Image (cartoon, grey):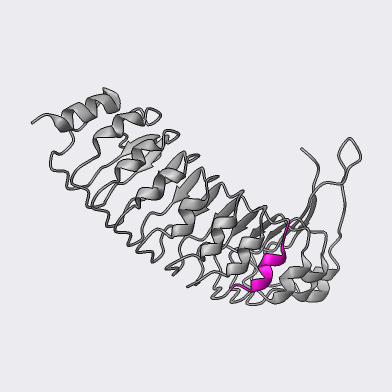
Amino acid sequence: MGATFSYQCSKNKNTKRQKSRKEISSLNIFSESNASGKKGSVIFNYILKNEAEIPNFIWHMKSVEKLNLSHNRLSKVPPAVAALEHIIVLNLCGNCIVHLPQELGLLRNLKVLFVNMNYLSEVPEELHLCRKLEVLSLSHNFISGLPSAYSELSKLRKLNVSNNFLVNIPACVFQIKTLEFLHLGSNNIESIAESVNYLESLKILIIDYNNIAALPRTICLLTSLEHLNVDYNKIQTLPNDLFLLTNLGRIAWNPLDKGFHVFNNPLVKPLPACVEGGLDMLVSYLKDG
């Protein structure tokens, strides 16, 4: 692991005094190198400062690769964010952001973006230009859809849009074949489209606490699935081909366990408290009169 250049501006929990800009600018900045002499990634943490605006000096730190602005009171991200041309990880979690600028699309090296726990009702279409993006977390917002252009995020592996206002799974999601993790829990989703089978790399699908009445038969073609959580929905019957999902292996009851989670659904034939025989036994049990 390469050494890092770290510039910390965390507030002491034992004092309410905040550093002035003069104090911040006077902090010692130091650089470290790894054994091979190569410069490590540049990291800047500006958390728990209770700031309502992003300080202008941050936009002059053009070499920063990891920027943590989480858990402040930020209401917006200015277009100046485009200056961070080397940024790889941007954490805006836990703020009061209601709008993201289209200039985010200029961050062509961005791989990880956290904007969860904000006040977003939409996200900029230009984000699809961040073709290196691998992780996108938009949970706990007010989002009701995603731009169709997001289908072009050809390296996206993890997408979290849980705790929003989705009624349907955005069509663009089914075109992101690189997805391995998809969290859609706690929305108002009523159905899963047949095209879910296009997500051939998917290992984890969480879609609990929704209004889904049935699982499409095509979900049984997602043979890479190791974790399928449809707890707390309105499912009455399960597809007969469920046994094809051999990597699920079992009925799981603990939310953290891998397996098939189907607890708290109005199944026509309720599951026994424990099914030890895997999905084959489950399918046989559900078929038996």
- Residue 204 in the magenta stretch? The answer is no
Residue at left offset 60%, top offset 50%:
154
Name the residue nearer the viewer: 180 or 160. 180
- Residue 105 in the magenta stretch? The answer is yes
Determine whether 263 is above or below 169 in the image.
above
Q: Residue furthest top?
A: 277
Residue at left offset 26%, top offset 25%:
280
Q: Quadrant of the C terminus?
A: top left
Name the residue nearer the viewer: 102 or 149. 149
Q: Is residue 13 visible?
A: no
Q: Report x, y in % for residue 97.
A: 56, 73
Residue at left offset 41%, top offset 64%:
164
Magenta residue span: 100-108
For this view, does 103 lie left or right of residue 275?
Answer: right
For this view, does 57 lie left or right of residue 136?
Answer: right
Q: Report x, y in % for residue 131.
A: 66, 55
For this view, does 124 lie left or right of residue 6?
Answer: left
Q: Report x, y in % for residue 151.
A: 54, 57
Determine whether 279 is above or below 31 in the image.
above
Q: Is residue 31 visible?
A: yes
Q: Quadrant of the N terminus?
A: top right
Determine whether 74 is above or below 259 in the image.
below
Q: Residue furthest left?
A: 289
The image quarter in which residue 44 lies: bottom right
Residue at left offset 18%, top offset 46%:
236
